[in-house]
Image (cartoon, rainbow, N blue to C red):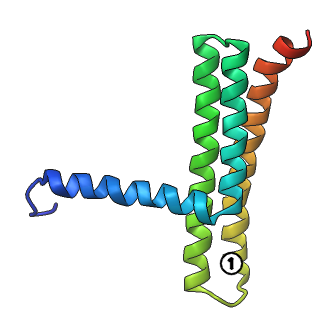
Amino acid sequence: MSSQKFSIIERVRSFKYAFNGLRLFFVNEHNGRIHLVSAIVAVALSFYLKISGLEWIAILSVIVAVFMAEIINTSIEKLADVVSPDYHPKIKLVKDLAAAAVLVAAFLAVAVGCIIFVPKLFL
């Protein structure tokens, strides 16, 4: 347990670091920008189609799941590159597993999007 006292300034500073991480993610990571554009399209389509409250919860949940998976994947990749700049089979395994988590989240997002949007657009 930490002996440091609670500090509002330190809590605000921690938010600053987190927002900086988001900024770096969207500015520096190609996949982050792809996911951001996809999220904007999904949100715009949601407004256009006037989806229900529960549908909004589903759409926003899968958007956040994809962002979280991609941010964690990127973090693992950056750390792995520092720990082992040269090829290492176990580092490759870790990177592949982290990428698989993004893929699973993206598949879920596409499935939820299809369940919500396809009937409203095409049926």
Q: Is residue 28 above or below residue 34?
A: below
Q: Is residue 48 above or below residue 81?
A: above
Q: Regarding mark 1 in the picture, which secondary structure is present there?
A: helix
Quadrant location of the N terminus?
bottom left
Q: Which residue is mark 1?
A: 90
Report the side of 17 relative to 103 (left or right): left
Report the side of 17 relative to 93 (left or right): left
Residue occupying the point 66% across, 29% down = 43
Residue occupying the point 55% across, 66% down = 75
Residue 58, image x and y in percent? Answer: 63, 24
Q: Is residue 98 above or below residue 112?
A: below
Question: Along the line of sight, which residue is nearer the eye, 2 or 53?
Answer: 53
Query: In the rendered image, which quarter is residue 62 located in?
Result: top right
Residue 82, image x and y in percent? Answer: 56, 84
Residue 21, image x and y in percent? Answer: 47, 60
Quadrant location of the C terminus?
top right
Q: Furthest residue to the bottom?
A: 86
Amino acid type, mark 1: Lys
Q: Furthest residue to the right?
A: 122
